[in-house]
Amino acid sequence: MLNLLLSVLKAIAIGATLYVQVKPVLGTLVLLANSDLTTYWHALVELFRHILRVILGLLLAIAMIDFAMQKYFHAKKLRMSHEDIKKEYKQSEGDPHVKGHRRQLAQEILNQEPSAAPKPVEDADMLLVNPTHYAVALYYRPGETPLPLIHCKGEDEEALALIARAKKAGIPVVQSIWLTRTLYRSKVGKYIPRPTLQAVGHIYKVVRQLDEVTDEVIQVEVEL
């Protein structure tokens, strides 16, 4: 709407300038019609040169004003957007109810202590191995467990037994050396350590993308 208004004002300004410049010399042009062709032609050329200079000057002034206005409105729009973002951030982050709710959720997660008793590997989502010395089974159910937890684990012969049982039960066996070693330090029934959340999430994503579970060990290396 603003651009349309500016275009109309430009057209009016140019038309008014032409009218002001041409009207005073119309009588002179009529009188010169009785003179020789050369004189009449020179008068027309000078008139058009004068009008051209005036129009160019007017267009330059209009362009400068237009540029200044566009810059002003653009800066105003950015300033308003920035203020809206700050306002929204203050409303969400500064609201004591929102902060209190977040702290309550975090405290609930920390206070929830799952059972420390080892569970059958057949109930696990996957079994992480390293590759035969350690085995750690993970269990995660949204709404039941806030985070994946250590379902069961084994070392050496126990690890081999868990691998065999997992393959027989169709549980994905994933080889991730450093992640398995890190998770093996956690106790059974405890949630995975916070620094491993991203790595474990990546492996869950890889496992979900499998078309079918095979007896082969899936090799996925992640950085902690």
Image (spheres, rainbow, N blue to C red):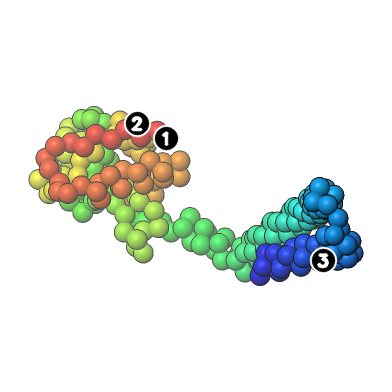
Q: Does residue 77 show up?
A: yes
> For the residues marked 3 and 1, what is the alpha-carbon distance in whole angstroms?
77 Å
What residue is shown with label 2?
178
**Along the viewing direction, whichever of 117 and 86 lies nearer the viewer:** 86
The N terminus lies in which quarter of the figure?
bottom right
Contact? badges 2 and 1 (CB < 8 Å): yes
Q: Is residue 17 left or right of residue 199?
A: right
| Residue kind at label 1, given as amino acid type | Leu
Judge the density around disc 2: few (<14), some (14-19), many (≥20) Cα neighbours within 10 Å: some
Splitting the image into 4 quarters, where does residue 29 fall? bottom right
Residue 119, given in percent of the width and then of the height, sits at 24, 51
Residue shown at 71%/68% (left/top)?
A: 8
Q: Is residue 51 left or right of residue 167?
A: right
Secondary structure at numbered mark 2: helix
> For the residues marked 2 and 1, what is the alpha-carbon distance in whole angstroms?
8 Å
Residue 169, given in percent of the width and then of the height, sits at 12, 49
**Numbered label attached to residue 224:** 1
Residue shown at 56%/66% (left/top)?
A: 101
Contact? badges 3 and 1 (CB < 8 Å): no
Judge the density around disc 1: few (<14), some (14-19), many (≥20) Cα neighbours within 10 Å: few
Residue shown at 77%/65% (left/top)?
A: 15
Residue 30, given in percent of the width and then of the height, sits at 85, 64
What residue is shown with label 3?
19
| Residue kind at label 3, given as amino acid type | Tyr
Q: Is residue 127 left or right of residue 61?
A: left
Q: Earlier in the sequence, mark 2 or mark 3?
A: 3
Residue shown at 32%/33% (left/top)?
A: 221
Q: Earlier in the sequence, mark 3 or mark 1?
A: 3
